[in-house]
Image (cartoon, grey):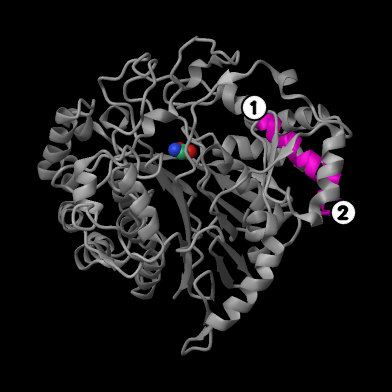
C-alpha cells in the first residue's frame, strides 16, 4: 500500500517532519529520517545505531570506525537482521587516493556440506540451515585495513545497549509476532518478556545480557572472542544439540576476504559495487551499461518509454544473474558480463515498443528464494571517506536459533544456495550449477552496497535489503539521483520498479496510484504485466558541494539519519 500513496504520504509527512524539527545548537535542523551536515552522516534502520555512528564520528573516528560500531549496535537494536551471527559486505571508498575496497564477510558452507544436503527442502527455521558466520571477522578486517579508533571503542556502545537495554518502540510488535511463531526456547527466553509469557509493549525496555557478554568478549579479544574460546564452544555445542553442521574447525577456518569492488561508469560517474559472491555489482553494471545507451532524462522519469527501458534492462541482467553467477572462488564467471560491448549488444536487443517475453531469453532456472529481511546502512565522514554496508541473517531473525548462553541469533543463509542440482521442477525450472552447495563456498547474494563517485569525490552512498529486489532498488535510487537529478529524499521516496526475469511480471509500487494509471496502461499495451511489488529500505547519503545529506527510507518506523 505504502508506495502506492507515496505522494499524499509525502505531503502529510512533510507536515509531520516540520512539526518534529529540532533546531540543534549549531543551527542545523534535523529529524529522524533526514540529516544534513558538513562533518559526517550515518543512516541506518535504527535510531540508536545511527546515533552510535554519529557519536563515533564525533569522537574523531572515520567512516569505517562508525560503520563497525553501527553494525554491532544493530546486532542489538535490530535483531531481525542486524547481527553477529550472520554475514554481509562492506564497501569502503577511502577518498584519500587509496583504492576502494570491498570486505566480503559472507557466510560459508560448513565443511560437512554436500551438494544435495537440502534437496528435501523443509523448514529453514533450524540449525541445519546455518552458514558459518562472517560478521565479526569482516568488521575486524575492515578495522585492520582502515580503522583509526581502538577496536573496543567500536564494540562497547553495543555492549552498553545490550546490557543497559533500549526502548523497543516499533520493535515491540515485530518481536511479539516473531515470538509467537518461534519454536526455539532460547529465543523465547532471551527475547521474550518474562520468557515469552507476556507480550511486549512499545514502551518496554529490552535487556540482552548474554549478548552483552558475547560482545564484551569480541571487544576484548577481537576474532578470538567469537571464533575461539567461550563463544566458539557455545556455538559448537548449540550445533551439536540441534543437528547443525558447523564445527569448531569451521569457526577457526573462517576468514573474511578483501576483494576488488566491481567498477563501472555511468554518465561520467564511477560506480563501485559488490563483486561475487554477490550478484549485485555485476547485475547493476549490466543494467546501467544498457541504460546509458538511451537518453532517459529527456524522456522523463515516468515516461512509458523510460520505464519500459528500465524494465527491459532488469530482465536481461537478471537472466544473466541466474545463468552465470555464484562464488567466484569456486566457479568461472564470464568476463564479458561487465563489458560495455556486451551492454551495447543487450541494449540493441531491446524492442522499443514491445516487452520481451522472459522465456525468449532462455528457460527458467531454479533460483534460491532470498528473503527481504536484510539491512543496509550508509556512512560518510568529514574527509569524504564513505562506507556502504549491507548485512543479513537471511530470513527475519535468521534460523530463529539463539546460541544458548551466548544470546545471539544465527543466520539461515544456506537457503541462498540453489538446492536442486540438475533437477527440473514442476514449473520447468532447471537447477543451475553456479550456485550449488560446496563445502566452504559462499552462497550467492543480491546485496548491493554501492558508492558513486565523480572526480574522485563521493556523490552517492546507497544499498538496500530486499532479497533479489535489492539490485533493482539500488538501480532505482541510482537512476533517480544520477540520471534524473532528484533530491535524495525524492529519490528514496519515489515508487520503485522490480523485474527479475522470472516471474515475468513487473512489480511497481505506484501501480494503484491514479497518478500512474496512464503509465500502467501503456506498459500493459507494450506487453508488461504490472502488479504490486518492489521494496527495500535504501538508507542513503548524497554528497553535494561539501554537504552530506542523509535520507533514511520511509518504509519503517525506526529508520534514522544522524549527523555529527
Ligand atoms: N540473503 C539475502 C542476500 O544475500 O541477498
Instruction: State whether the magenta stretch is mostly helix, strand or loop.
Output: helix
Q: Indicate left or right for 448 with 411 as reference.
A: right
Q: Residue at x 51, y 56 (%)?
A: 97
- Magenta span includes 309: yes
Position in image of residue 361 (x %, y %): 72, 20
Position in image of residue 229 (x %, y %): 10, 42
Is residue 500 or residue 41 the one in the foreground?
A: 500
Q: Mark 1 points at which residue?
A: 502
Position in image of residue 9 (x %, y %): 65, 66
Q: Indicate left or right for 382 with 518 as reference.
A: left
Query: Which quadrant of the rendered structure holds the C terminus?
Result: bottom left
Q: What stretch is highlighted in magenta?
A: 294-317
Tell me, yes or no, if residue 233 can be seen here. yes
The residues bearing labels 1 and 2 have C-alpha atoms spaced at a distance of: 30 Å
Say whether disc 1 or disc 2 marks the residue closer to the N-terminus: 2
Crowding around mark 2 (Cα neighbors within 10 Å: few <14, some 14 to 19, many 20+) is few
Q: Indicate left or right for 127 with 9 as reference.
A: left
- Magenta span includes 235: no
Q: Which residue is drawn at 75% across and 34% down?
A: 529
Query: Tag 1's secondary structure?
Result: loop
Position in image of residue 264 (x %, y %): 63, 42
Is residue 461 or residue 206 the one in the foreground?
A: 206
Q: Name the residue under label 2.
A: 298
Q: Residue at x 37, y 50 (%)?
A: 177
Amino acid at each position: 500500500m505504502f508506495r502506492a500513496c507515496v505522494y499524499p504520504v509525502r505531503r502529510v509527512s512533510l507536515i509531520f517532519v516540520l512539526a518534529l524539527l529540532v533546531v540543534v545548537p549549531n543551527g542545523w535542523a534535523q529529524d529522524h529520517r533526514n540529516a544534513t551536515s558538513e562533518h559526517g552522516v550515518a543512516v541506518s534502520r535504527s535510531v540508536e545505531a545511527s546515533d552510535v555512528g554519529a557519536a563515533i564520528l564525533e569522537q574523531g573516528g572515520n567512516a569505517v570506525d562508525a560503520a563497525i560500531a553501527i553494525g554491532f549496535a544493530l546486532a542489538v537494536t535490530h535483531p531481525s537482521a542486524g547481527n553477529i551471527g550472520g554475514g554481509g559486505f562492506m564497501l569502503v571508498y577511502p577518498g584519500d587516493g587509496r583504492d576502494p575496497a570491498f570486505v566480503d564477510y559472507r557466510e560459508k558452507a560448513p565443511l560437512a556440506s554436500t551438494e544435495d544436503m537440502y534437496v528435501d527442502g523443509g523448514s529453514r527455521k533450524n540449525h541445519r540451515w546455518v552458514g558459518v558466520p562472517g560478521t565479526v571477522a569482516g568488521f575486524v578486517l575492515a578495522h585492520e585495513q582502515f580503522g583509526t579508533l581502538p577496536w573496543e571503542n567500536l564494540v562497547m556502545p553495543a555492549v552498553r545497549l545490550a546490557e543497559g537495554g533500549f526502548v523497543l518502540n516499533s520493535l515491540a510488535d515485530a518481536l511479539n509476532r516473531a515470538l509467537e511463531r518461534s519454536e526455539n526456547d532460547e529465543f523465547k527466553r532471551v527475547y521474550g518478556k518474562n520468557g515469552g509469557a507476556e507480550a511486549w509493549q512499545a514502551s518496554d525496555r529490552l535487556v540482552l545480557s548474554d549478548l552483552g557478554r558475547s560482545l564484551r568478549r569480541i571487544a576484548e579479544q577481537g576474532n578470538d572472542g567469537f571464533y575461539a574460546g567461550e563463544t566458539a564452544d557455545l556455538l559448537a555445542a548449540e550445533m551439536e544439540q540441534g543437528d547443525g553442521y558447523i564445527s569448531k574447525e569451521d569457526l577457526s577456518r573462517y576468514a573474511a576476504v578483501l576483494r576488488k569492488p566491481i567498477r563501472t561508469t555511468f554518465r561520467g560517474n564511477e560506480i563501485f559495487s559488490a563483486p561475487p559472491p554477490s550478484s549485485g555489482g555485476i547485475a547493476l553494471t549490466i543494467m546501467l551499461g544498457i541504460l546509458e545507451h538511451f537518453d532517459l532524462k529527456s524522456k522523463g522519469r515516468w515516461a512509458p518509454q523510460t520505464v519500459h527501458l528500465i524494465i527491459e534492462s532488469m530482465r536481461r541482467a537478471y537472466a544473466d544473474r541466474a545463468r552465470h553467477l555464484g562464488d567466484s572462488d569456486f566457479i568461472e564467471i564470464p568476463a564479458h558480463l561487465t563489458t560495455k560491448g556486451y551492454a551495447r549488444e543487450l541494449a540493441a536487443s531491446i524492442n522499443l515498443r514491445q516487452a520481451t517475453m522472459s522465456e525468449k531469453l532462455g528457460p527458467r532456472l531454479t533460483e534460491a528464494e532470498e528473503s527481504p529481511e536484510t539491512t543496509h546502512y550508509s556512512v560518510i565522514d568529514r574527509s569524504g571517506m564513505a562506507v556502504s554496508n549491507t548485512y543479513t541473517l537471511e530470513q527475519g531473525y535468521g534460523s530463529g536459533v539463539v546460541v544458548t548462553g551466548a544470546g545471539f541469533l544465527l543466520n539461515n543463509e544456506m537457503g541462498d544456495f540453489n538446492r536442486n542440482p540438475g533437477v527440473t521442477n514442476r514449473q520447468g525450472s532447471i537447477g543451475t550449477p553456479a550456485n550449488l552447495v560446496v563445502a566452504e563456498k559462499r552462497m550467492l547474494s543480491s546485496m548491493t552496497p554501492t558508492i558513486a563517485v565523480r572526480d574522485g569525490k563521493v556523490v552517492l552512498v546507497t544499498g538496500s535489503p530486499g532479497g533479489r529486489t535489492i539490485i533493482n532498488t539500488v538501480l532505482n535510487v541510482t537512476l533517480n539521483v544520477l540520471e534524473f537529478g532528484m533530491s535524495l529524499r525524492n529519490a528514496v521516496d519515489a515508487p520503485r520498479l522490480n523485474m527479475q526475469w522470472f516471474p515475468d511480471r513487473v512489480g511497481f509500487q505506484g501501480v494503484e496510484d491514479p497518478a500512474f494509471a496512464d503509465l500502467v496502461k501503456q506498459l500493459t499495451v507494450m506487453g508488461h504485466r504490472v502488479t504490486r511489488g518492489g521494496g527495500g529500505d535504501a538508507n542513503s547519503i548524497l554528497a553535494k558541494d561539501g554537504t552530506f545529506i542523509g535520507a533514511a527510507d520511509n518504509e519503517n518506523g525506526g529508520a534514522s539519519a544522524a549527523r555529527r
